[in-house]
Amino acid sequence: MNAAACALMRARDALTDLRPQPDDITADALAGLSQTPKTLPSKYFYDAEGSRLFEAITREPEYYLTRTELALLEARLPSIAQAIGPGAHVVEYGSGSGRKTELLLDCLRAPVAYTPVEISRTAVLEATARLSQQFPDLEMLPVCADFTQPLSLPESTRPAQRTVMFFPGSTLGNFTDAGALALLRGMRQTMGVGGCALVGIDLDKDPALIEAAYNDAAGVTAAFTLNLLARLNREIGSDFDLDAFRHRAVYVRERLRIETFLVSQRQQTVHVAGQPFDFAEGEPMQVEYSHKYTDASFAALAAKAGLKVTHGWNDAQDWFGLRLLQPA
């Protein structure tokens, strides 16, 4: 057995598996489709195929977010590491491929443990296995779960000086205002009095630049969005016709957010758990938000959650930012 296979086996042994079950997905889908306008939860984008497609999105030329945040991390790591301090237990929500995590862990002084919390079992196992080879002395405590729900994190064997919540990629922007506030409050509770959170935020800028990132010419984002329907068909037995829906993403400047829809291309009826849902031709079904921030709007959101911005780093163009939060 090679080193990679051994690392994957160790990751499986350490995994805390709390991933959503089919009944949970069905209930969420039924609740969303019963609303007006209809919605589906974006947290279910990330099955194995969705995670693969998202990684492909990050390599598209229009998608500035990942490469800008990676460059920002690389440029500011010494300052970030100093602000965080030694002996950290790093807890990451939505760990994905772990590329940004690798940079952070490499710069920190004597971190004691890493806990990725990821809804995709495949993604969390692969990322943990890869990182365990690069950081053999770091305790890996992976959790497969929906991080928007309450959960108990595994404790590290060695005591940590502080808990650091790592939430890159502007994933916070994918929540409604109420959802983002609830998530930050939950992070505050998890980090404790002496903890902190390093959060990536996409900043308000030219709407054309933002819209292009969510409507790439190669159609990878469209395939990613439609994969949500494929997952529901496979896992809960719905009968969405993927050819009958079209991806659309628009930046609504007054609400500082991208709004992503799957638009019905004809009059049709979709069944979920035996319940029919009628769609009119041209009817949009909301599947994702992606909020953008100003310094003022983000600081205000953090304050509502009982947090304060203690450090901030932006790229040279002010396209993307990293903010360190601590309990107020």
Image: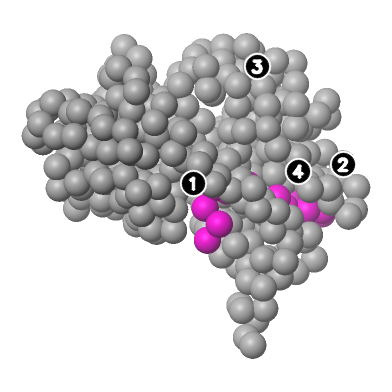
Do the CB atoms of the residues marked 2 and 4 lie less than 8 Å apart?
no
Amino acid at dot 3: Ala
Q: Residue at x 63, y 62 (%)?
A: 128
Return the residue at label 3: 305
Q: Which residue is mark 1?
A: 22
Q: Amino acid at mark 2?
A: Gln
Classify mark 3: helix, strand or loop: loop
Distance between mark 3 and mark 1 Cα atoms = 32 Å
Helix, strand or loop at disc 4? loop
Most foreground residue, 263 or 312: 263
Against 317, is 130 above or below? below
Q: Of marks 2 and 4, which one's residue comes earlier in the chain? A: 4
- Residue indicated by mark 2: 161
Query: Residue at the spot x=48%, y=17% of the render?
Result: 177
At label 1, the amino acid type is Pro
Side (left or right) of 303 relative to 141? left
Q: CA distance from mark 2 to mark 1?
A: 38 Å
Which type of secondary structure does the marked residue at label 1 adopt? helix
Q: Which callout, 2 or 1, points to the residue nearer the camera?
A: 1
| Foreground: disc 1 or disc 4 | 1
Where does label 4 land, which residue? 153
Q: CA distance from mark 3 to mark 4?
A: 20 Å
Chain-order first, disc 1 or disc 4: 1
Please tell me which of labels 3 and 2 falls first in the chain.
Answer: 2
Mark 3–mark 2 distance (CA, rounded to whole Å): 23 Å
- Tell us which disc is closer to us: 3 or 2: 3
Amino acid type at image mark 4 = Leu
- Segment colored magenta: 108-122
Percent coordinates x, y for residue 272 in the rendering? 33, 38
